[in-house]
Image (cartoon, helix red, strand yellow):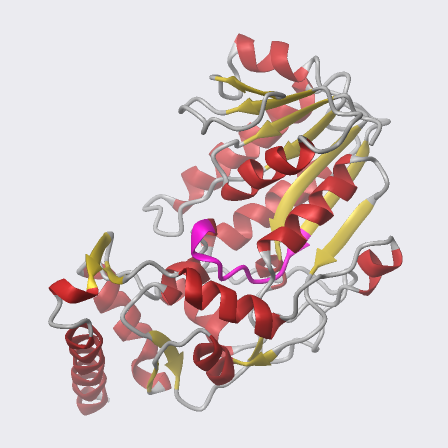
Amino acid sequence: MVARTIALVGALHPGAAMLALALEEEPDVERILGLQQAPAPLLGPKFEHVAAAPGDQRFEIALAEADAVVLFPLLEVGERDARAARERLTASVRRTLEAATRASTVVLWSSGVVYGGHPDNPVPLDEEAPLRANFDFAPARALDEAERQVLDASVGRPEAIRVVLRGAAVWAPSWHSFLARALTGPAMVGVRGYNPQVQSLDPDDAVRAMVLAASGQLRGVYNVAPDDSVAASEAAQLAGRRRVEVPESAAFAVGERLASVGVTITTPGELNYHMYPWVLSNRRLREAGWAPAKSTREAMVDAGHAVPDGVRLGRVQVRRGDVIRGAAAAMAFVAALAALARRRGGRA
């Protein structure tokens, strides 16, 4: 580890907190700057919270001291104005790159969703696969734009090493991804006739890739993924969750209806990622010296065990004991899906 001062932009991201703790163990790292306007959690003795956002003078001063920068885009799946959200993220990335005048390494934590969920996706996808983020899934399109900026040597310090890490699906509830949110719902939603291969990346494996990237030992784009994948139906079983399937003709209408009443278990833009595979190859990162410690099966079991004792209805976490032993919530959810599917089918 060469970088003595490492700045984490988007310090409230769960991965940033885990990375900060991991960097505490690196003897060459002297300071870890967490840049985020909102208060950051109390971490190790090397961690310093910088209450600043891109465009603030304090933000620019802090980044000018960093030897390496790791960006964590914070995206809201349900953002009403997707275009405005993408523009904010793009501006944030550009200002970060322009302010990091000393950094020899810049790392972006991205996601495999940039490849898109498509029926003709090869299994697995390598880094040379075209980026085809689904148009109706705003976070994927925003990450695509963020990647292009980070990899553009004309933005920021030209000689800086640029690294993009595309993470496979992270189901761990602590990461608050759209997949993790689906796992905490009354049931996992699937589309009838579709049982794609899925992956589950262990958060600790993700963080070890970040440490390697921040050390300056990587350059370019790398997928971060486990070695294996399983069918979506098996993933639900491994997590200890019921899988509810709805007809394809009704799936997108169901998503819209659920979102309209605040039950954002699955939004229409997410459905492609539940219907089609976006399994990532980790060959390139393995060749660079990284290897996953956990398989998809192990990480999926861990994610299921980490789900809070309750079900999520919209933005509210409800204790299972408060919803008639917990089963009532799932059954009501299933009944609602079935009713919506029948109603949709009757109009077809």
Residue 298, percent across and down? Answer: 58, 70
**Location of residue 193 with respect to 237 vertically, above or below:** below
Q: Residue at x 70, y 78 (%)?
A: 123
**Location of residue 347 with respect to 162 vertically, above or below:** below
Residue 205, percent across and down? Answer: 67, 55
Left or right: 108, with 236 as reference point = right
Q: Is residue 112 magenta?
A: no
- How many numbered marks, from 0 up? 0
Left or right: 11, with 251 as reference point = right
In-front residue for pair 338/293: 293
Q: Residue at x 54, y 10 (%)?
A: 58
Q: Residue at x 33, y 78 (%)?
A: 251
What is the quadrant of residue 260 in the picture? bottom left
Residue 156, percent across and down? Answer: 73, 24
Q: Which residues are magenta?
A: 166-174
**Location of residue 151 with respect to 309 vertically, above or below:** above
Residue 199 appearing in the image: no
Residue 98 appearing in the image: yes
Q: Is residue 171 magenta?
A: yes
In-front residue for pair 281/44: 44
